[in-house]
Amino acid sequence: MKHFAWVACAALAFSGAMVARATPPRSVNEVAITDAAMPRLLSEYGFFTDAPAQLPGKGVTPYRLNTPLFSDGAEKLRFVYVPTGSMARANGENLLDLPVGSALIKTFAFQQDGKRRLIETRVLLHRADGWLALPYLWNDEQTEARLAIAGARLDLVTPKGEAISYRVPNKNQCKECHGLNGVVTPIGPKARNLSRDWLAAMVDAGHLDKLPQDVDQLPVWEDRESANLTAAARAYLDVNCAHCHRPGATASNSGLDLRWEQQDPHAIGIGKRPVAAGRGAGGNLFDIVPGAPDKSIIAYRMSTTEPGVAMPEIGKETVDSDGLAIVRKWIEEMAP
């Protein structure tokens, strides 16, 4: 149902049908994106015509990722804004090259008492001196989100009924996932993790220069059981782990490179010893042991919530049983 609702919303945004609303869409405040200041309220950007309902404003396009980050099962509503008179450039299967003045907007929500409760909205703003990541925390009335430089903790219940202390990252923690070669970088909108239909619609709307050609496509997570097993597992590791476990990122010293495009078995952990032994290894000797998920450090660290052992280190308070199952099955079916 979520997938259907997203497709319907995206179709309306691209077709311009939202223009027919009784209340005309607001225009985005481009100065708020590019100016040196940090707006105190989410509404100052003008990203939404109806922020509590997450209805995007003029020029703001919803999107989804084929394989998303787990984030304790949070519902995530994603949007991209490309400034007036500019367009993004396709870069093969990699990140779309979004011009200065662009913004990526992502709202995290959970169900509470049968209703969607907005928790936080994270924005990535492309300014002249680089990308800036800012978190905004929604109020109890669900009418506004306020800048939360220091982050926050909230008691929530996940879709699987697990009570958690959810962490809204502080401004610096954003860099832990978005840091690459010392600068903040988007990690989500890669051409390989976006549908061809969405990319084509972006081209038609004048927001993207061309349709990327000959690019891989990550499996749609909801279809993982019928997808190629290696593709489903590698897509999961690429999306959930590779923003840290890759050259130039915050966990590059692990020696693991879990990016989709990495083809060296040793680099993705097969037969690879960890750079440092400790309780994080759980007594295991290799990151991945073909045919033996119970002896593989990757599976071990995915299977726990113990601080200092669990992976990913942030953005996870519970075990992603679906993701763990795919990765375990992939390891299990590897030829020893």
Image (tube, rainbow, N blue to C red):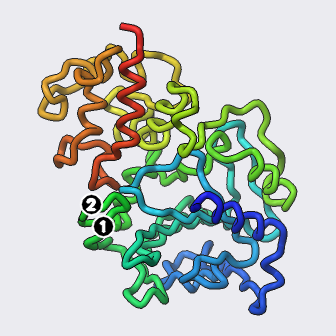
Compared to 119, does 279 lie above or below?
above
Q: Could you classify mark 2 by the number of other residues whose Cα lies within 10 Å: few (under 14), some (14-19), or many (20 or more)? A: few
Residue situated furthest top in the rendering: 336
* Residue 92 quadrant: top right
Q: Could you classify mark 1 by the number of other residues whose Cα lies within 10 Å: few (under 14), some (14-19), or many (20 or more)? A: some
Where residue 158 sits in the image (x, y, percent)?
Answer: 34, 62
For the residue pair 18 and 83, the one nearer the viewer reads as 18
Three-letter residue code for mark 2: Glu
Drawn side of residue 305 relative to residue 180, left or right: left
Q: Which quarter of the figure is the N terminus placed in?
A: bottom right
Residue located 46% across and 82% down the image: 145
Q: Which quarter of the figure is the C terminus placed in?
A: top left
Compared to 47, does 67 lie above or below?
above
Where residue 273 sits in the image (x, y, percent)?
Answer: 26, 18
Q: Secondary structure at mark 1?
A: strand
Where residue 334 sits in the image (x, y, percent)?
Answer: 41, 14
Drawn side of residue 84 relative to residue 167, left or right: right
For the residue pair 126 and 321, the one nearer the viewer reads as 321
Q: Give the numbered dot on residue 162.
A: 2
Three-letter residue code for mark 1: Val
For the residue pair 119 and 267, the one nearer the viewer reads as 119
Where residue 58 sits in the image (x, y, percent)?
Answer: 75, 77
Residue located 84% across and 68% down the image: 15
In primary-sequence order, the first of circles 1 and 2 is 1
Residue located 29% across and 73% down the image: 152
* Alpha-carbon span between mark 1 and mark 2: 5 Å
Q: Mark 1 highlights which residue?
A: 157
Q: Are marks 1 and 2 in contact (CB under 8 Å)?
A: yes
